[in-house]
Amino acid sequence: MVEALPAPLGEGADEPEFESAEETIEERSAAVPAEGHGQRLDRWLVGLAPEFSRNHLQGLIERGCVWVNGQPARSASQRLQAGQLLRVQLQPTAESQAFRAEALPLQIVFEDAHLLVLDKAAGMVVHPAAGNWSGTLMNGLLAHHAGAAALPRAGIVHRLDKDTSGLMVVGKTLEAVTALSRMIAAREVHREYLALAQGHVADELFIDAPLRRDPVSRVKMAVLAGGKPARTDVYCLGRVDVQGRRYSALHCVLHSGRTHQIRVHLASRGHPLVADGLYGGASALGLQRQALHAARLSLRHPITGADLRFDARPPQDLSDAWVAAGLPPPVLEERCG
């Protein structure tokens, strides 16, 4: 049996030290030379701070971080005069803040010296990216244990979509991260999901269809020839009719882990997930996010070899939708090793 570590650090506990945002702010000043006379302010600032994009510098002007002769700059298009003194407070970009520790609530269900398993909340982004440079799982892991800062992606070896809830495994040492990555590539980490889909789905549905980026909408994936192989096994747990609409409760077993795999596979068969607007699923049963939950995770411990299996009950919104549909409590049968 693997010895578990104590729960995550609580309020007031010692935490790893990280550089604060305030310590990264730099100020620069310079007088406008003769050749700068008549130039736009934002264009001239690019020469003063070439490591920043013009767009970011325009944002600093709008935020009141640029002064001309001691007065806040009026606009990015303001024309300069030779001899004026410019001062700029170089706030860091959002991207530069992405890999910072943030004390976030992480629902950890298992932890030892090598790995942890957590139940990710719907709405939490896994990796920092455009529009989500903070508040991500990676930020939370950096605050949770000091070793995360030395690991690729803070130890994250697979991900869940932002609005998908459920179980994820994370490595805490380089040895564990390497082993877990190899196990996932070899399909030795088993992931099973609960879902609510539109329409009445057959008792068993085995979808083996390649996936790649949609050529029309780059935010979507699509079943297309030439894509990466992807297989999803779907088992129907129940079917209901609610106010003239049909729904099915599903147990989905992944045999590969492509982006949006379950969502795309089911939508391609005419059964988009409830409230999955990206793939045609209408909001219903009180849900405002796709009805998908990673309910079971099973694997061999990458260091000790112990067999591990974890089950996570659906969060409140999905449980309420299940009840609203009049479905019996979900029970996952044994479908994979």
Image (cartoon, rainbow, N blue to C red):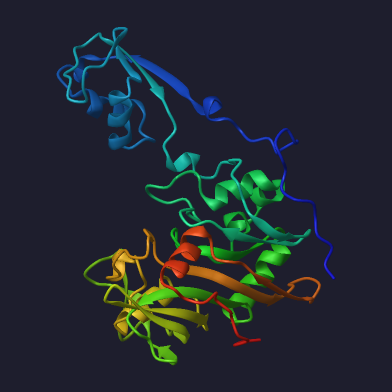
Quadrant where the C terminus is found in the figure: bottom right
Front residue of this view, candidates 79 and 323: 323
Image height of 241 relative to 285, above or below: below
Does residue 182 appear anywhere in the picture? no
Where's the N terminus, which quadrant? bottom right
In this view, the residue in front, 310 or 22, is 310
- Which quadrant would residue 335 be assigned to in this image? bottom right
Measuring 66% from the left and 68% from the top, which residue is drawn there? 178
Seen in the picture, residue 201 relative to 292 is either above or below; the reply is below
- Residue 8 visible at all: yes
Residue 122 position in % (x across, y down)? 48, 57
Closer to us: 13 or 53: 13
Report whether 279 appears left or right of 321: left
182 shown above or below 49:
below
Q: In the figure, is residue 138 to the left or right of 308?
A: left
At 84% from the left and 63% from the top, the residue drawn is 3
- Relative to the observer, which residue lies in front, 16 or 124? 124
Indicate the position of residue 274 as horizontal and vertical percent values: 36, 69
Q: Is residue 141 above or below residue 205?
A: above
Q: Residue at x 64, y 48 (%)?
A: 149
Q: Quadrant of residue 180?
A: bottom right
* Residue under the point 48% across and 25% down: 25
Image location (x, y in percent) of residue 85: 30, 10
Where does the image place residue 289, in percent across and percent down from the top left?
Answer: 39, 60
